[in-house]
Amino acid sequence: MVSISTSETAYKLLHSVWDQNRIELVEDFKVLLLNRACKVLGVFNVGSGSTTACVVDTKLIFVAALKTNAASIILAHNHPSGNLKPSRQDTHLTSKMQAAGEILDIAVSDHIIVTNDGYYSFGEGMAYEKVKYGDRIYFEAQVPF
């Protein structure tokens, strides 16, 4: 089982399971389901949308979390535009999910916006862009928007 300890670890796992033929085409929404030790129980594909939006059903996310006995979840969606800035809808959805998770005692540990060139972590309030030095890729933190 893979363990998630940082937003970067979560991003790398999410990016590795994202359909690379769709990441810059349509918005998809996924959830990492985690146990109490932050080990990944599974990745739940919530839905797929258009080039600018995706319908997300709170009930389906928490049904999956309850069925897997997840202690926490990490929300994730991509921005086909490559823009790492969260929208008002993204921020509202994150707050809504956190409130629902509190009632069910399932923590929403983070919400990550995934692109090919980096990610944004709601949990950290920071964007991280990929930077290549030689044959290695690093993530540089960007000032919050």
Image: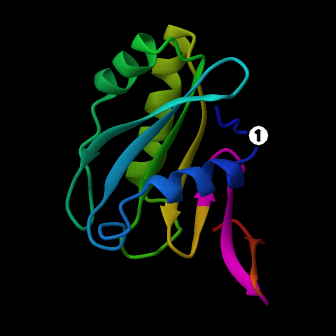
Left or right of 15 on screen, residue 29: left
- The quadrant the C terminus occupies is bottom right
Q: Is residue 29 visible?
A: yes
Under mark 1, the amino acid is: Ser
| Front in this rendered view, residue 86 or 109 | 109
What residue is shown at x 45% (from left), y 53% (from top)?
17
Q: How many marks?
A: 1
Residue 58 point in image, percent of width and height: 33, 27
Q: Is residue 121 visible?
A: no
Colour treatment of the image: rainbow
Tell me which segment is drawn in magenta: 120-134
Residue 6 point in image, percent of width and height: 75, 46
Left or right of 8 on screen, residue 44: left
Q: Quadrant of residue 46?
A: top left
Q: Main secondary structure of the magenta part?
A: strand
In the image, residue 127 lies in the stretch drawn in magenta: yes
Relative height, residue 67 to residue 21 (above, below)? above
Label 1, on which residue?
A: 5
Left or right of 136 on screen, residue 78: left
